[in-house]
Image (spheres, rainbow, N blue to C red):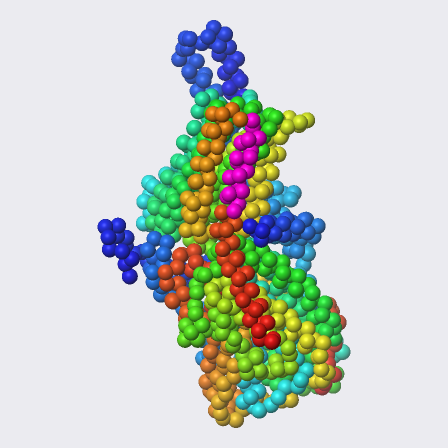
Amino acid sequence: MLSTVKGMIQTLSSTFRGLRGPVTKLYPENPTVVQNRFMGFPGLTWDKNVDEPFCTGCMVCIRNCPTQCMTATMKDNPKFADESSKRRKIVDEFEINLNRCILCGICVNVCNFDAIVMTHEHEESGISRDGSRMNLSGLLEIGGRYQTQTGWQPSSKD
Amino acid sequence: MMQDNSENQTIDMMLNMGPQHPSTHGVFRMELRIDGEKIIDVKPHIGYLHRGSEKLSEGEQYHQVVTLFDRMDYLANFNNELVYCMAVERLLDIEPSKRTEYIRVILCELNRIASHLLYVGTIGLDAGAMTPALFSFIGRDRIQTLFESISGARMMHNYFKIGGLKEEVPTDFVSMVKGIMPEIRQDIDQAEKLLTFNEIFLSRTKDIGVITADQAIDYGLTGPCLRGSGVNYDVRKSEPYSVYSDFEFDVPVGLDGDCWDRHWVRIKEMDESLKIVEQAINNLPDGDVESSLGRRLIRPSAGEVYVKAENPRGEIGVYIVSDGTDKPYRLKVRPPSFCNLSAIEPLLQDSWIADSVVILGSLDIVLGEVDR
Amino acid sequence: MIGRMLSYQLLCSDLDTGATVRFMSDYFQDAVSTLISLLTLFSFLAVMVLSLVWLERKALGRLQLRLGPTRTGPFGLLQPIADAVKLVLKEDIVPNDAERVIFWVAPIIVVISAFMLWVTIPFTPGIVVENLENMGLFYIGAVGVIGILGLVLAGWGSANKYGVIGGLRAAAQLISYEIPLIMVLISVAIVTQTFNLVDIVNLQSPVPFVLVLPLGFVLFFVAGLAEVGRTPFDIYFAESEIVGGPFVEYSGAHWAVFFLSEYINTFAIATLTVLLFLGGWSGPFLPSIVWLLIKIYAVILLIFWIRGTLPRLRIDQLMAFAWKVMVPLSFYLVVCCSVYVFYEMPWWALTVMSLFGLLAVGVIIYRYITAPARKVAEVRERLRSLQMTQEE
Ligand code: SF4
Ligand code: SF4
């Protein structure tokens, strides 16, 4: 009996607490705050110095992806010929099937060129399955948004 | 099986509980044979969530398998990652740094609290109280937000690497963990106070689903289900792995082996986990968390290894056979939920329909791990 | 009510002359007026149900540190309407094996019985569809039981095992709790010497019956909770065990009808509690109907509060509680009331007797329900002594 009464009092007090500040928030009005390290969908980064993607299409991430959700092809970098870029090869086509991606971040860890990042993008729901196949321009777009949002800098390991 | 053969004969009825049932904790199916409200026989069916994790592991490189372990027991991701990483580390014969181990232990214990908090919510729902579930999610959310700021994901972290961690923890890690500790303690209190000593909850769980210590050992129960029956067995104590031998903590043990004792053991375990986190965070050593392997491809020499650890649900064991390539030749998991679930048949015998969900809830299974 | 007033004026001459002769047209007018008042009652109840739905969702939300409905209208006030529209527009699925006739009739029985109860419940002395002078309480006791039939039929007709179990649980539970409920009604009738609800309320003007019959109040409230299947007595549609019991196969408008009747019944139990024990519409300053509504909503909030706190009992515990605690106590109450009336004692004598019963019930419940708790305490004691011996 006593504990029941205690429970009743507890729910009552929580009601008053809830009236002052409920824990839940309305969603679109209060967008989800993600932490700095939040891993959303992967995106490709843009090298502003040379005005081209970091990605060389080296396929390391593709071989390491546990779900095999990416494909890429590379081509000769035209900017390498006129010496404006140090990259001999550059990505030609890049596709990630975001339906298959499990957001594990392995691709980011294995990439040697800082070309791929886990962006803060997480509201990618659509009405067609096709819509979640991201091509190079889409990936660069969400990657670029991530770059401007967080001021991302390539680590100086290369 | 018929109770009496007098003129008031009743016939049995088959009742299918699950796989789409709110209280079977996922997609578990029980074929109940009931006589009125009494269960006289039960046939469990599993496999609805079978994803072939063990077979899939054979096709993945060692560092990719971590993602599969994340998804096995999806309520205790860090604990699962830990046991797998430990297994491969032993296979490779390397030691992670002290700092790595400490951070791993902190995260695992926090994960244990998160998992037990979810348990408090679900046992409440099974018993018909909806409020504890929502209260317990407050604390769970706090812990998950912490995880997100450390590993980048709320559930599928992929944060433990073989031989180290993916990256160094954020600079304010210590203050963050210290900051949420009192809040978590409060949240635990708030969530369980509505249930643990509530008279109705007691009458629903005390002396229900009793399993004696001998029986529990025979069925291979581990974790809170075994300790609820009064057996003092905890891998963290009996065969300390990682750095658990550095910490001072008790192993709460029940007496009767009924639902309430299992519940009580879990509640007490959360306190012990907080104790461990407190000691670990206060003595966090400096150092490196990078794996000594660097980015090299992991290629253990041929051999086999069996490593066990204490998950929130019980003892998890990982058995890996390596043939010297970059992928495991065979990987077998001893999932605690599966072994705990095996006791459902004797537990449900002669209980009420209403008890069946409470008993199942008190075993605290995760179907992702049962079916793998 | 309006119709009734209208018909009074029309029949004025009749009443003046003693109304010995009434023509067919008078009967017709009577029927029309009754119809109008029934329609008014219906719409009033519909509004009340909508408000209850909103209140329940909001109150439970706040209890659980949530927001409750917010999207539809200011404070989510239009949520019940959105719910209703959604339910009505939904496809009405009838299972293949269902007994069609029974499946269709069951919700109608339930909702009609819920409405019939309201015919004689007064809101103020003037506002009542038909104040059955000599048999108000009797009628309520009689009509209240019909709903059970609907629930059993619903469970049976939907050809679902959960439904059958739920229906049988409903029959067992509702019939068991009907007995203490009716016994309390009888004891109130004994004390007031009338079946007329208006008179009962008027008799409470100095002392509300909650002071005279505290035991009766508690018994009535608890039995009422069980009658409308509210936590901790929501056994017959226990979501986590038998996934909705009799309602498991119902969808769309049919389910909406069950939903409606459930809330009407909740409202009825709260209203009856107020009328029988809390002094009905009497109260200072405010108009009587406002007082009545305030009291009703207070009782309803109490019901929601209990729902937000307690787990559910098990069916055998529930039945044991009914037959071992509620029924004997309600008989005790009837005996007390008879003694009180026979010896013409002062009213506080009844309070004392009733309180004594309440004490008894407290002790019984306490001992019954805390048996496990005591065991736990024992266990802890043993553990502590074990630890002490270990330390030594
Ligand atoms: S993202 Fe990195 S690893 Fe992947 S193809 Fe581009 S450069 Fe190579
Ligand atoms: S995050 Fe993981 S699954 Fe997704 S693309 Fe990268 S490696 Fe593949």
Q: Residue A14: horizontal and vertical position, in percent?
A: 65, 52
- Most common secondary structure along the magenta stretch: helix
Point out residue C189 in the picture as x, y percentages from the top left corner. Answer: 47, 27
Residue C158 visible:
no
Instruction: Please give the range of residues in magenta.
Output: C346-363
| Number of numbered tags placed on the structure image | 0
Q: What residue is drawn where x is 50% and y is 48%? A: C365
Q: Quadrant of residue B149?
A: bottom right
Q: Along the line of sight, which residue is nearer the eye, A52 or B277?
A: B277
Based on the picture, tell me whether residue C360 belongs to the magenta stretch. Answer: yes
Is residue C316 in sight in this rendering? yes
- On screen, A147 above or below C177? below
Q: Which residue shows up at 64% across the image and 77% down it?
A: B248
Q: Which of B322 and B307 is in front in this view?
A: B307
Looking at the rendered image, the quarter that the C terminus of chain C falls into is bottom right
Q: Report the residue at 51% width, 60% height from top.
A: C375
